[in-house]
Amino acid sequence: MFNNRPIGFFDSGVGGTSIWKAVNHLLPKENTIYLADSKNAPYGEKSSDEILELSVKNTEILLGMDCKMIIVACNTATTNAIQTLRSRYEIPFVGIEPAIKPAANNSKTNSIGVLATKGTLTSTLFTNAAQLYCNTTIVEQIGHGLVELIESGRTNSNEMTALLQTYLQPMIEADVDYLVLGCSHYPYLIPQIKKILPAHVKIIDSGEAVARQTLRILNETGFCDSEHGSHQFFTNKETTVLRSILGPSMNIQHLDF
């Protein structure tokens, strides 16, 4: 069964491109549309009502672009809004949740770290997931300021390094052997994180899991039959940072939304 309609993605900015890359790597023939809501980044500092309102807005835009499914490429939007989105709209949604389960199940020290936004760590979905692993110490850390630095093109700045050292030190002291990245922006920080954490600490993000779930849904909704997928990226701020992440050949446009 073929279905050439695009897969839609949205995030509070450029971070969800880490999820897009994983999906595109597994499913290179699929057409995609990506919304970077950088004007409203970070979602993690907003109220649940605001996050839901923004998620509905983004969903309506992608539906207007005839998307066959939507990937909520944002942990905060997933944990605060995806249940409502699934009940309100008929198309499939794929979300991102911090990968606590594989970290807790594989930890040898029974101590894992979770670096995420305030909106994710304070959500009911995250709290319920964390409570399932009461025998594991979970060191939670809100990544204040990290998304803002990535969105402004300062991923490799001294300021970023200083913040990461502050946030990761309690995890080192707690002897974590897994670090769960609970924000789709944070995979772009992995090179810096690896310089700070002990070499044995494994870092988990959700990109591959989202790609596999997308593949499962496409078995029901239909795959593209094109040779190569076509991709459109829209941002409601300037395109410089998005272009630096994706490369000059990608179709990146400014869109007021």
Image (cartoon, rainbow, N blue to C red):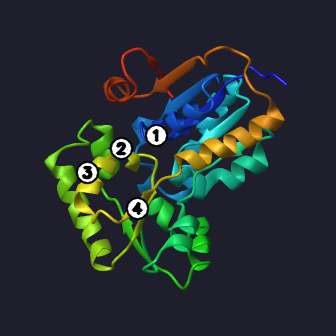
C-alpha distance separating marks 3 and 4: 14 Å
Image location (x, y in percent) of residue 42: 40, 48
Taking depth in this image into account, of 56 and 98 the one nearest to the observer is 98
Left or right of 241 in this view: 205? right
Give the mark toward the camera: 4 or 1: 4
Q: Which residue is mark 2?
A: 188
C-alpha distance separating marks 4 and 1: 18 Å
Left or right of 21 in this view: 70? right
Q: Which residue is mark 3?
A: 192
N-term-proximal mark, 4 vs 1: 1
Q: Which residue is mark 1?
A: 18
Residue 181 vertical position relative to residue 93 in the rendered view, above or below: below
Q: Residue flagged by tag 4: what amino acid is it?
A: Lys
- The local crowd at label 2, few if under 14, some if 14 to 19, many if 20 or more residues have their Cα within 10 Å, is some
C-alpha distance separating marks 3 and 2: 9 Å
Q: Residue flagged by tag 3: what amino acid is it?
A: Gln
Q: Which residue is mark 4?
A: 202
Q: Residue flagged by tag 2: what amino acid is it?
A: Tyr
Give the mark toward the camera: 3 or 4: 4
Image location (x, y in percent) of residue 32: 60, 25
N-term-proximal mark, 4 vs 2: 2
Q: Label 2 near label 1: C-beta < 8 Å?
A: yes
Which circle marks residue 245 in the picture?
Answer: none
C-alpha distance separating marks 4 and 2: 15 Å
C-alpha distance separating marks 1 and 2: 8 Å
Left or right of 56 in this view: 244? left
Q: Residue flagged by tag 1: what amino acid is it?
A: Ser
Label 3 SS: helix
N-term-proximal mark, 1 vs 3: 1
